[in-house]
Amino acid sequence: MKEIKLTDVGRLRNEVAKYKKGRKLDIRLFNQVARLAWLGKIVLCPLDPEDPGCKAWLLHMQPLEGLAAGIVKVDEDLDGMPFASRIHILDAEQGAALAAILREGMETRVRDLQALDRRDFYFEKFFDRDRRS
């Protein structure tokens, strides 16, 4: 078994504290990730759900595919990231904001799909509205 010697416990505590706080994305990157969140292309979870003092979020970004990839513009540095760098540890504020954006996008898509399910295309397209009254 490999042994790791700890010589500076204070430094180790500082590193752990930095992870527990998370990091902020810059404005440009946050806006890009927010677009992915609205489309449901991110996965968010608490970094350490068992530690009430840890408010950071673990973020995983999924690449855009299909029609969304052709329409939504994502910066090359975000789109060209290697897989490992698509995982970030966010601070509490930005993580909560992205969770709200993810929820908003999901609710909007659900409303649109429910409206589509209730819509009757036949009558709308084949009967003149003026003659119906």
Image (cartoon, helix red, strand yellow):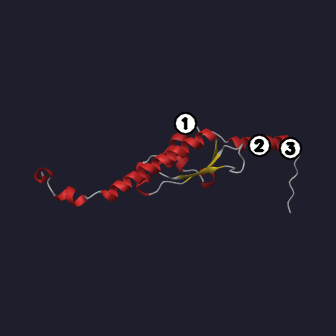
Is residue 12 shown left or right of residue 80?
Answer: right
Q: Which residue is under mark 2?
A: 15
Quadrant containing the N terminus is bottom right
On screen, residue 60 versus residue 20, left or right, reads: left
Image coordinates for residue 81, horizontal then vertical, percent: 58, 50
Q: Which mark is residue 9?
A: 3
Which of marks 2 and 3 precedes in the sequence?
3
- Residue 74 can be seen, yes or no: no
Q: What amino acid type should be assigned to the residue bearing mark 2?
A: Glu
Disc marking residue 27? 1
Look at label 3 and name its amino acid.
Answer: Val
> In the orientation shown, which residue stands out farthest toward the left?
131
Report the side of 38 relative to 56 (left or right). left
- Residue 97, compared with residue 2, is above or below; it is above
Question: Is residue 115 or residue 83 the one in the foreground?
Answer: 115
SS for dot 2: helix
Q: Tag on residue 82?
A: none
| Local SS, label 3 | helix
Closer-to-camera residue (104/72): 104
Farthest bottom residue in view: 1
Residue occupying the far front of the picture: 133
